Image: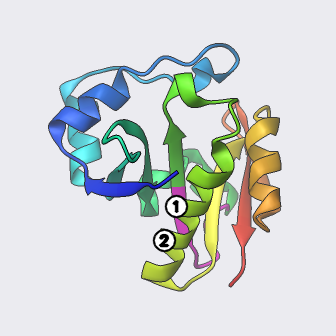
């Protein structure tokens, strides 16, 4: 699968914000609003496309990839590049995660050359398993009340 990246725009952001995941992943559902679109335009969000020019996912970096309440737990004190990802709902659970996540990790590591960190809901065992395959190790757990864990991949 050949993937490519485009800068986020209003059209891509609107489409992504309308994606609907099935339970228990519906936790990741968003609401289409001008405020949410603007957040995706004002922060480092990037749209990911397959070789058929179809929008299949996105990633973000920096504070946009952090869970704000994690700050109070010291979850983001270590200097890393935070990444957040999303794969189109109808593509999840089909074995595409490895290629999708590999593309993102490689892209971000080439740009920053720093340790990577992500934050994942503890119930999302499927994602945690994928991240561990890439060498990410669990770091700090915190509750918002949703339970999260940060995972770090050293260089």
Q: Does the magenta stretch include residue 77?
A: yes
Give the residue at mark 2: 108
Percent x, y of residue 148: 72, 43
Can you give x and y, in whole percent of width and height, for residue 9 in the image? 18, 44
Q: Which of 61/133 is in front?
A: 133
Residue 10 is marked as none
- At x 58%, y 57%, the residue is 71
Residue at the spot x=52%, y=51% of the render? 1
Q: Which span is picked out in magenta?
A: 75-83
Q: Can residue 143 be found in the magenta stretch?
A: no
Tag 1, which secondary structure? helix
User: Camera-side residue: 40 or 71?
Assistant: 40
Check whether the beta carbons of the residues at disc 1 and disc 2 lie within 8 A of each other.
yes
Front residue of this view, candidates 85 and 122: 85
Nearest the eye: 95 or 7: 95
User: SS at mark 2?
Assistant: helix
Q: Is residue 87 visible?
A: yes
Report how many numbered discs are placed on residues in the image: 2
Residue, far top: 23
Residue 119 at what x, y percent from top left? 65, 51
Q: Is residue 132 left or right of residue 76?
A: right
Q: Give the residue displayed 49% in from the left and 31% down from the top.
A: 88
Distance CA(mark 1)–CA(mark 2):
6 Å
Q: Is the magenta stretch mostly helix, strand or loop?
A: loop
Residue 130 pos. (x, y %):
76, 50
Quadrant, the C terminus? bottom right
| Residue 104 - label | 1
17 vs 79: above or below: above
């Amino acid at each position: 699968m050949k993937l490519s990246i485009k800068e986020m725009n209003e059209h891509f952001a609107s489409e992504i914000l309308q994606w609907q995941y099935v339970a228990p992943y519906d936790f990741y559902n968003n609401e289409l609003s001008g405020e949410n679109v603007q957040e995706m335009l004002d922060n480092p969000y990037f749209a990911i496309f397959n070789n058929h020019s179809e929008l299949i996912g996105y990633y973000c970096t920096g504070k946009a990839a952090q869970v704000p309440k994690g700050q109070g737990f010291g979850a983001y004190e270590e200097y890393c590049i935070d990444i957040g990802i999303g794969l189109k709902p109808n593509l999840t659970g089909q074995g595409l995660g490895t290629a999708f996540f590999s593309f993102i990790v490689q892209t971000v590591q080439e740009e920053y050359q720093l340790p990577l960190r992500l934050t994942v809901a503890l119930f999302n065992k499927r994602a945690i398993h994928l991240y561990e395959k890439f060498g990410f190790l669990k770091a700090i757990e915190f509750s918002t009340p949703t339970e999260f864990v940060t995972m770090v991949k050293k260089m």
